Image (cartoon, helix red, strand yellow):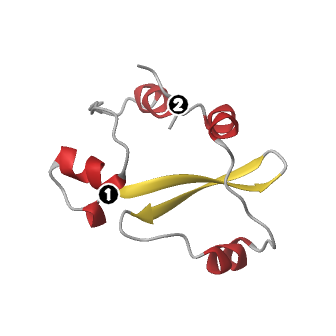
């Protein structure tokens, strides 16, 4: 399956391997399926900074976003999480 990441890796000539797992319902299930600790997972979250303006936020699997710190770091007063359809439209990725 081609994704923006696999297409970019191929275009850059980077060696890469796509590993597919069964769909899971929680980070705990995902960690168990891979045989790793939750803390070893990196969650990639799409955050809406403004109208048609999104950022990726990488968060350790056992942590949550510190919204006040993130707003201060980005210099904005408001951030939100888009719904699944909006996130897919913005990124090309599905949950």
User: Is 37 on the left-hand or right-hand side of 50?
Assistant: left
User: Which residue is more in the foreground, 8 or 72?
Assistant: 72
Q: Is residue 2 above or below residue 42?
A: above
Q: Is residue 66 above or below residue 20?
A: below
User: Is 84 on the left-hand or right-hand side of 12?
Assistant: right
Callouts 2 and 1 close, C-beta under 8 Å: no
Q: Is residue 35 above or below residue 79?
A: above
User: Is 83 on the left-hand or right-hand side of 26?
Assistant: right
Point 71% across, 70% down: residue: 74
Task: Where is residue 23? Give x, y as percent.
Answer: 34, 34
Quadrant of the image containing the N terminus: top left
Task: Where is residue 53? Give x, y as percent.
Answer: 77, 50
C-alpha separation, residue under disc 2 versus residue under disc 1? 21 Å
Residue furthest to the left? 35
Residue 50, quarter of picture:
bottom right
Q: Which residue is mark 2?
A: 4
Point 47% across, 34% down: residue: 5
In the picture, the disc for residue 41 is 1
């Amino acid at each position: 399956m081609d994704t923006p990441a696999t297409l970019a890796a191929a275009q850059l000539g980077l060696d890469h391997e796509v590993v597919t797992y069964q769909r899971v319902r929680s980070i705990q299930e995902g960690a168990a399926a891979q045989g790793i600790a939750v803390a070893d997972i990196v969650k990639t979250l799409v955050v809406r900074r403004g109208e048609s303006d999104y950022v990726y936020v990488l968060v350790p699997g056992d942590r949550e976003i510190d919204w006040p710190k993130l707003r201060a770091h980005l210099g904005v007063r408001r951030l939100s999480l888009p719904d699944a359809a909006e996130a897919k439209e913005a990124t090309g990725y599905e949950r």
